[in-house]
Image (spheres, helix red, strand yellow):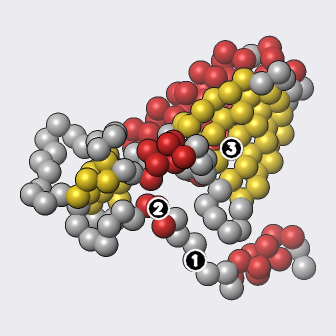
Amino acid sequence: MAKFHQSQKNNVFLPEQHDSTLNPCSGGTAYCSRCNALYDAGTWAWQTPETRLPAGVTEVVCPACQRIEDKAPAGTLTLSGEFLKAHHREILNLIHNTEALEKAEHAMERLLEVTTLDDAVQVTTTGVHLANRIGHALDSAYKGETKYHYDDDQPYVSIHWQRD
């Protein structure tokens, strides 16, 4: 059996996974007192100037702010290689621009931290989608070798990108 078919077969009987931190209350509307994101109809979004909070809205800390406070990333990217050293500033700009685009549409997708180590850069994110999008942006812009590892037990992705 081909690798693709085997991986699809393995996923058929897995229960659907949900991030329990994404639903702050059993129903109704909530807003984050730290970042002003609004939870309504099952999704988090940024408030617009026209947004009027209904009476009785619940004040909570959103999952992204909670992950930032707990330093608990949902995605980790590790970048390395000689190309990274030569194009460090460009790559950091790509990471921050990608975050700005993702964060504008998805309030729970944010950078936790961008750390420059001796010969690598480590990026942590509050959501798997931002980490994934940064990985794809690096691949598209600079090629290199990218490896993705998704955790089976919780919403978490670890991505390693390298180009020499």
In this rendering, which labeled residue sits more in front, label 1 or label 2?
2
What is the spatial separation of the Cα atoms under label 1 and label 2, in whole angstroms? 15 Å
Sequence order check: which comes first, mark 3 or mark 1? Answer: 1
Residue at mark 3: 76
**In the displayed structure image, the side of residue 47 where residue 138 appears, left or right:** right
State the image quarter where residue 57 is shown: bottom left
Q: Is residue 2 at all visible to an observer of this figure?
A: yes
Residue at mark 2: 21
Q: Looking at the image, do the residues carrying marks 1 and 2 touch, with CB atoms under 8 Å apart?
A: no
Q: Residue furthest bottom?
A: 13
Q: Residue at x 77, y 24 (%)?
A: 117
- Identified by mark 3, the residue type is Thr
Q: Is residue 35 above or below residue 52?
A: above
In this rendering, which labeled residue sits more in front, label 2 or label 3?
2
Q: Residue at x 33, y 40 (%)?
A: 34
Q: Residue at x 71, y 62 (%)?
A: 151
Q: Is residue 33 above or below residue 7?
A: above
Q: Residue at x 47, y 32 (%)?
A: 100
* SS class, disc 3: strand
Quadrant occupied by the N terminus: bottom right
